[in-house]
Image (tube, coloured by chain):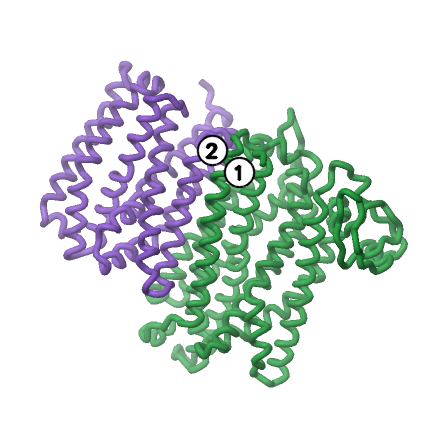
Amino acid sequence: MDTLILSRLQFAANMSFHILFPTITIAMCWLLLYFRLRVMATQQGGKDTVTSIAWEEAYYFWTKVFALTFALGVVSGITMSFQFGTNWPGFMEKTGNISGPLLGYEVLTAFFLEATFLGIMLFGRTRVSPRVHLLATVMVALGTTMSAFWILSLDSWMQTPAGYEIINGQFFAKDWVAVIFNPSFPYRFGHMLLASMLTASFLMAGLSAWQIIKGTATAGTRKALHTAIIAASIAIPLQILLGDAHGLNTLKHQPAKIAAIEGIWHTEKGAPLTLFGFPSEKEKKTLYALEIPKAASLILLHDAEGEIKGLNEFEGKHPPVAPVFWAFRIMVGLGFLMLAVSWSSAWTLLRGKKILSKSQLYVLAAMTFSGWVATLAGWYVTEIGRQPYIVYGLLKTADVVTQHSSPMVMVTFVTYLVVYLLLLAAYIGVLKFMAEHPPKMASAEIAQGA
Amino acid sequence: MELTWNYLAPLIFMAVMGLALLVYVVLDGYDMGVGILLPFASDGDKDVMISSIGPFWDANETWLVLGVGVLLTAFPMAHGVVLTALYLPVAIMLIGLILRGVAFDFRVKVHINHKPFWNRIFALGSYIMAVSQGWMLGSYITGFSYTLWPLLFSAGIALTLPAAYAMLGAGWLIMKTSDSLQTQAAAWGQRVLWPMGIALAGISLATPMVSATVFAKWFSFPELFALLPIPLVCVAAFFAIKHVLSNPKIVQAG
């Protein structure tokens, strides 16, 4: 394998490993803030009630999960900031004037906000006043969200570049507002925040369901379970609508990506929607395709006879079809599964029957990490779908890769991979262990209620 | 020379980066030092040692991110060049950083039987980071030259830096803990004092030999007089540490 493919694999491994954790923490922090507010709202005259202690328990348990997740996100994130330089020196050299400041803002504003206030959030519960502690929680939530804002702005700029000029092969910012709020940014940012909310709530619901199944649930477990189910049921329809809008935006700016997603090989009017099939680049068609006539044109153009450009128009400029095609179907399939599961669970809860059945609990437990799979699939669609470009239409990935020998990159790639797989196994193992042996809240902390 | 923005901006960012790295080495240095000393402590003391750095390590590591962030933002070209040249040591350091960072959290959340394993991972990560940082410093000073003497020089720094961090860690523990652990920390400090001193002196002498730039800066007049206080203060600091560590009363005062 050559350095390019190895560098891409290594970067993909790093990215995939990293995104697992922010995807949880970005939204979980807001859920923790909600728990915090519920604690305060259910106290009476500053004294704890049965309900407020339950919320406190939920907060306590999920703060521990949050801390562990955050740590994994931080260390893998630091790794990322180095890898731009170690593996893609050409990227920094050519787009540094734009990507540098955007990454810089991410690091300076968000990182400092998060890392500093997280200390207060995790260790200051009994040392600072409830008000200051609440403020720290808000700051951490803002920090993680701002972190996402900047990094998604850069990623979107690489997909739909705007506000730049190129002088001697180097990118310069002409209009920063246009750079930051480039055409695909609002869609991608919203899509990612909702993905995070879904990932966090399915994790919370799944792990809580597992606690109930295993008989290790506390009063806080049900609070967390219900909150998560409601949050997921609100987020999922929004996500499906926003995903559709994102798709239309992609059609406008990156038609080759859409052609790969839909498996449309030749430009056609009234293009069918391929539900399943096996894309073959060699034969330039999708084998054993299961199609709905005219549906792709209808969905993408709101016109059954609309013309969609096929891959034939982008010879040598379109991404590999199969991974994009498949990843998209996994993402969408999981999205609809999430809709079914969260709405049916919410229905049970809201109808007055406060108890989920055993089978509902097992389904939720099975879907604990479904958000991860959907999020990764979505990222693969968008990032593989950008290939062969690193900055869409302007700069090819192959032109910015490092000059290192491939054995060297192979060594680091395998090392990273082994470490990541071990840590992933450890993370999941520890979550299971924590769910089955919920950490006891010190009675002093319950009494303090803060 | 006219003071224009184009002239000043790189200097300002260089200063910020220098400051970030200095603060990083001191702050993350003490918590890496605690990790380096960890294997020599009893199980009970291990908990105290790690909880003493618990609230701080994350913020400390942020300084490294700031340093790289400024390098990325202000000197994107240098970011590419430096990190390409340091490909392997950076990758190794990052592995250490990952192991260390996660061990912090894992060790208190896993089954009690697995705790010693994560303690070892924490210490291992600290060693890997310290050694690889030393190696990077060495290769940076020698301008990424891969011949015998520069390589030996880098190896020298790689082996010294852990001693220096261990000293910082011992100082931190003396400040933050009490009783037997504090006494133990003072003993650790005394043990790493001479290796650290000899190595630092050796490297200070070797630096002008392997780096022509540094040689030119140090051994010309009148710069020599302006720079002379630096080694003198270092020597004074060395003997001050020696005095303090061998005096139990001062140690107990924290």
Mark 2 belongs to which amino acid? Leu
For the N terminus of chain A, the image quarter is top right
C-alpha separation, residue under disc 1 versus residue under disc 2: 9 Å
Colour chain A is painted in: green
Q: Position of residue A366 (x, y in %)?
A: 57, 69
Q: Which residue is mark 1?
A: A84
Q: Residue at x 18, y 46 (%)?
A: B188
| Side of A391 relative to A208 (left or right) | right
Across and down, in percent, residue B103 comes to: 37, 54
Q: How many marks?
A: 2
Q: Is residue A66 above or below residue B230?
A: below
- State the image coordinates of residue A396 (x, y, percent, origin top left): 66, 34
Estimate how packed mark 1 is, as few (under 14), some (14 to 19) or many (20 or more) residues with alpha carbons within 10 Å: many
Asked which secondary structure carries label 2, the reply is helix
Residue A381 percent coordinates (x, y): 67, 50
The amino acid sitting under disc 1 is: Phe
When the figure is inspected, residue A349 is found, relative to residue B32, above or below; the finding is: below
- Quick one: quadrant of the C terminus of chain A? bottom left
Label the purple chain with its letter.
B
On residue B83, the disc is: 2
Q: Residue at x 80, y 56 (%)?
A: A289
